[in-house]
Amino acid sequence: MSGSKLADFVGVFDVETADWDGRTRGRVLCNRSQVVFAADGHRERVRTSDIFDVTVGSPPRNLAPVPDTPMTIAYENGGGRAVAVVGAEHSTVEKFESVLFRVLLNGRSVTVKHPARVGGRVTDASYRSGTLALADGGVTVDAGDDPVTIQYAAVTHFSRMARAVDGTKRTTLTIGHVDDGVGQTTHLATDTTRTSSLLGRYLRQRYDELVASLADVTLSEQGVEALHTMYATGGDPRRLVAVLGLEPDAVKRLLRSLGEDGLITRRDDGFALTTKGQVVVNHYVARVNE
């Protein structure tokens, strides 16, 4: 294939638009302009500009199952839509997912409002134009002298909706995240729904991984209330004593348990929620508001 190869590995795949029937084993190659599935002397090319969704796990039922970890690529095809599913070792698929999303999203024009909120306070920040880039640790918007970086591990929630941006309705991602123990909200508007959908998908997959890491954490109502109190009023243990109505020794034991679960971290002025702790609080607030 022409152009610098960004990925080249052997996997098992099923491609709806290919000449062969069913799943086959071959090479998967990728550069900035195309993904190529090569098997038995045949090549099926998918332009990256036609890809509108990428998912890992849960492949479509109409295609043959593939071994190991499956990745599904959905793309436009002559006015219609098609999918390709490829299976390989988890580490290989993980690397390919990262490469492909960077090809699809890096360099896209976006408009960012950061921070739109700090805690519950609406700021006077304005929208700024910038360029999107995915890195190993997070997503960055290069917006001149003051770039905006949101760590994947810091994302706590997000939603997508149409917002008025400089007088024009645009598809906007609202991203909640934690910065030094403080909850913030950033609005990120994209020029196309495709870019918004792909970025939303990528953040969703990172977020789901974080939520999955909470599966083994079991909290009492006091533990959840302590996290919510810290979010609302800060991490001073004396406030927890007053709000929770517990003895100081009981609060110390509770804080130690929350720290062992990775939900809080110690700071010079007390304690702060970790990203895990922030996710638990979000779930708690959502449950209360139901």
Image (cartoon, grey):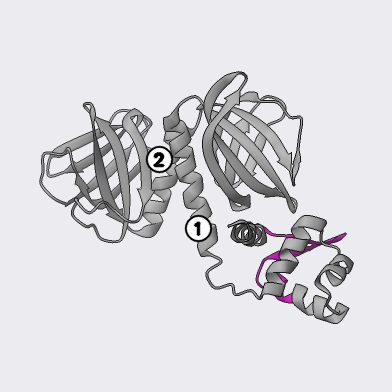
Residue 165: in magenta span: no
Residues 120 and 252: in front is 120
- Front position in the image: 171 or 148: 171
Q: Is residue 190 visible?
A: yes
Q: Residues within 10 Å of mark 2 (few under 14, many from 20)?
A: many
Q: Is residue 267 magenta?
A: yes
Amino acid marked by disc 1: Glu
Real-space Cα separation, disc 2 to disc 1, in angstroms: 18 Å
In x, y percent, where is residue 123?
Answer: 76, 34
Give the residue displayed 66% in from the left and 60% down from the top: 281
**Secondary structure under badge 1?**
helix
Element under disc 2: helix
Q: Which residue is mark 1?
A: 209
Tag 1: Cα neighbours inside 10 Å, few (<14), some, or many (≥20)?
few
Task: Between residue 238 and residue 145, name the one nearer to us.
Answer: 238
Q: What is the span of residues highlighted in magenta in the rendered image?
A: 256-274
Q: Position of residue 139 (x, y in %)?
A: 57, 40
The numbered dot on residue 285 is none
Q: Earlier in the sequence, mark 2 or mark 1?
A: 2
Q: Which residue is denoted by mark 2 in the rendering?
A: 100
Q: Vertical placement of 177 versus 144: above or below?
A: below
Query: Please, what is the three-letter code of the amino acid marked with disc 2?
Result: Leu
Quadrant occupied by the C terminus? bottom right
Q: Can see residue 102?
A: no
Q: With respect to residue 236, does 182 lie above or below? A: above
Q: Is residue 261 left or right of residue 52?
A: right
Q: Residue at x 52, y 26 (%)?
A: 170
* Residue 67 image-quadrant placement: bottom left
Q: Quadrant of the N terminus?
A: top left
Question: Which residue corresponds to the image point at 75% horizontal and 57% vertical from the top-left?
Answer: 231
